[in-house]
C-alpha cells in the first residue's frame, strides 16, 4: 500500500482535555481517558491520534493543546512532539479557544495555512479511509469552506450531534463533498430515528478550515473571543508571549467550537461535509468501550475462565467468568470473579471499584458528581 503523502501547508490540532468521567474510575481528572490504552493496542488514545495524523501533517505539523496538569504526561507519551508544538493553556476555556488559538497563531504566520482539529480521545477504525477523508477536506478548505467529516450513524444515538447533509458540491480534489444545511445537538430518540432515516450524519467534531477563515468566522460570531486570541497570537513569536497569554487567557469566553463557529457558519451556507466511511467512536462510556474490545477467549481455567461475550480490558488471566457477560477491567492487581450476571461492568482499580450494568453506563458521570459534592477529590 502506498504511503499517505504529507499535505503541504496542513497543520493538525489535537485538543487534549476533559476528564472522561463516564469512564471512571479508570479515567480521572489527573489521568483522563486520552492517556490510557483503551483498545488493547499497546498505544494510548493520544498516541494513536498522533500515529494517524503524522502521515498527513508531518511531526512538525501536529500541535497538541492541553492543560498544565497533563502537559508532562503528554510530552512523555509523545516524545517526538516538540516543546513549541505542545501548547499549554493556562486554564480550560473550551474547544473554540483551544483550536482558535492555534488558528490565530498560524494565520499570523501564513494566511493560507489549513488546520484540522481532531480530538485526542477518539478511536478510528480504518486509518486509510480517514486519510482519504481528511485529504478531501483539506482540498475543500483551501477553497474557503469550513469542512467537517460527518460519520454515518450506526443507530439513533442521542449522545451525538447531527448534521443535515444537502446537495453535492463541485470542488476539485473533494469528489464526495456535500453542503451542510445545519447542525442539531443531541436530539431525543424519536428525532434521532428520523434523522438517521433521512440520511443525516453524526457530528464527530472534526473540522478542517483555513486558519484565516476560522479567525474571520470567530470575529463574526464570537468577537470578544477572536479579539483576545488575535492579541495573544500577535505576541506569540515574541518575548511577550507568556505575559500576554497570562493576562488575556483568563478573560476569554468559554465556548465550544460547534456553537461559536460551526452552527452559525452552517446557517450562512459556509459549511461542507465529507462523509466518513470509517469506523469512529468517541469512547463515551463503558458500553461503547465494550463494543471496541474483542470477546475474551476461553482460557479453560479450572473455575471457569473468561467466556465468549465477556470483554476484558487488561490481563484476562486476572478474570474468572462463570456464566456471565459484560465488561471487566482488572487493573487493581487482584483476581476479579464474575459469576451469574449478564451485561455487567466491573472496573477494579487500586483505590476504587465500580460495579454497574452496560444499560446504565451513562450514569457513571452522576457517581463522579456525587463524589465531588462529598469532597472526595482524591477519587475523581
Image (spheres, grey):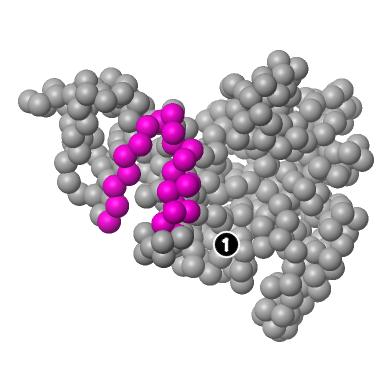
The residue under the point 26% across, 25% down is 341
The residue under the point 67% across, 24% down is 192
The residue under the point 48% across, 38% down is 362
| Nearer to me, 147 or 1 | 147
Q: Quadrant of residue 309?
A: top left
Q: Residues within 10 Å of mark 1 (few under 14, many from 20)?
A: many
Location of residue 67 in the rendering, given as x and y in whole percent from the top left corner: 56, 65
The residue under the point 56% across, 69% down is 83
In the displayed structure, 355 sits above or below 320; it is: below
Location of residue 113 in the rendering, given as x and y in whole percent from the top left corner: 79, 54
Q: Quadrant of residue 237?
A: bottom right
Q: Is residue 110 magenta?
A: no
Q: Quadrant of residue 111?
A: bottom right
Q: Quadrant of the N terminus?
A: top right
The magenta segment: 351-372
Name the residue that disc number 1 marks.
66
In the displayed structure, 246 sits above or below 64; it is: below
Say if residue 143 shows up in the picture: no
Secondary structure mostly seen in the magenta stretch: helix
Q: Secondary structure at mark 1?
A: strand
Location of residue 202 in the rendering, given as x and y in whole percent from the top left corner: 67, 31
Amino acid at each position: 500500500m502506498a504511503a499517505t503523502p504529507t499535505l503541504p501547508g496542513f497543520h493538525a490540532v489535537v485538543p487534549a482535555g476533559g476528564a472522561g468521567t463516564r469512564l471512571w474510575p479508570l479515567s480521572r481528572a489527573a489521568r483522563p481517558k486520552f492517556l490510557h490504552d483503551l483498545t488493547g493496542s499497546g498505544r494510548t488514545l493520544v498516541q494513536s491520534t498522533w500515529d494517524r495524523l503524522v502521515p498527513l501533517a508531518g511531526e512538525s505539523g501536529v500541535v497538541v493543546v492541553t492543560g498544565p496538569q497533563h502537559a508532562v504526561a503528554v510530552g512523555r507519551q509523545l516524545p517526538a512532539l516538540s516543546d513549541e508544538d505542545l501548547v499549554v493553556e493556562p486554564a480550560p476555556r473550551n474547544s473554540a479557544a483551544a483550536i482558535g488559538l492555534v488558528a490565530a497563531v498560524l494565520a499570523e504566520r501564513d494566511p493560507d495555512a489549513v488546520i484540522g482539529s481532531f480530538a485526542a480521545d477518539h478511536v478510528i477504525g480504518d486509518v486509510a479511509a480517514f486519510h482519504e477523508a481528511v485529504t478531501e477536506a483539506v482540498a475543500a478548505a483551501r477553497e474557503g469552506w469550513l469542512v467537517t467529516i460527518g460519520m454515518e450513524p450506526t443507530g439513533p444515538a442521542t449522545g451525538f450531534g447531527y448534521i443535515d447533509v444537502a446537495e453535492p458540491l463541485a470542488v476539485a480534489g473533494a469528489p464526495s463533498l456535500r453542503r451542510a444545511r445545519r447542525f442539531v445537538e443531541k436530539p431525543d430518540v424519536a428525532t434521532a430515528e428520523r434523522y438517521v432515516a433521512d440520511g443525516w450524519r453524526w457530528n464527530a467534531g472534526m473540522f478542517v478550515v483555513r486558519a484565516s477563515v476560522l479567525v474571520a468566522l470567530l470575529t463574526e460570531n464570537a468577537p470578544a473571543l477572536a479579539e483576545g486570541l488575535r492579541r495573544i497570537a500577535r505576541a506569540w513569536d515574541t518575548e511577550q508571549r507568556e505575559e500576554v497569554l497570562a493576562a488575556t487567557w483568563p478573560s476569554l469566553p468559554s465556548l465550544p467550537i460547534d456553537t461559536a463557529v460551526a452552527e452559525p457558519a452552517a446557517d450562512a451556507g459556509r459549511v461542507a461535509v465529507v462523509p466518513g466511511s470509517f469506523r469512529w467512536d468517541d469512547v463515551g462510556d463503558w458500553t461503547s468501550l465494550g463494543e471496541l474490545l474483542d470477546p475474551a477467549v476461553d482460557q479453560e481455567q479450572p473455575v471457569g475462565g473468561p467466556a465468549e461475550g465477556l470483554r476484558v480490558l487488561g490481563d484476562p488471566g486476572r478474570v474468572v467468568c462463570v456464566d456471565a457477560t459484560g465488561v471487566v477491567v482488572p487493573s487493581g492487581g487482584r483476581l476479579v470473579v464474575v459469576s451469574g450476571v449478564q451485561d455487567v461492568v466491573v472496573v477494579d482499580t487500586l483505590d476504587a471499584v465500580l460495579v454497574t450494568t452496560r444499560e446504565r453506563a451513562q450514569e457513571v458521570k452522576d457517581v463522579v458528581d456525587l463524589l465531588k459534592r462529598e469532597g472526595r477529590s482524591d477519587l475523581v
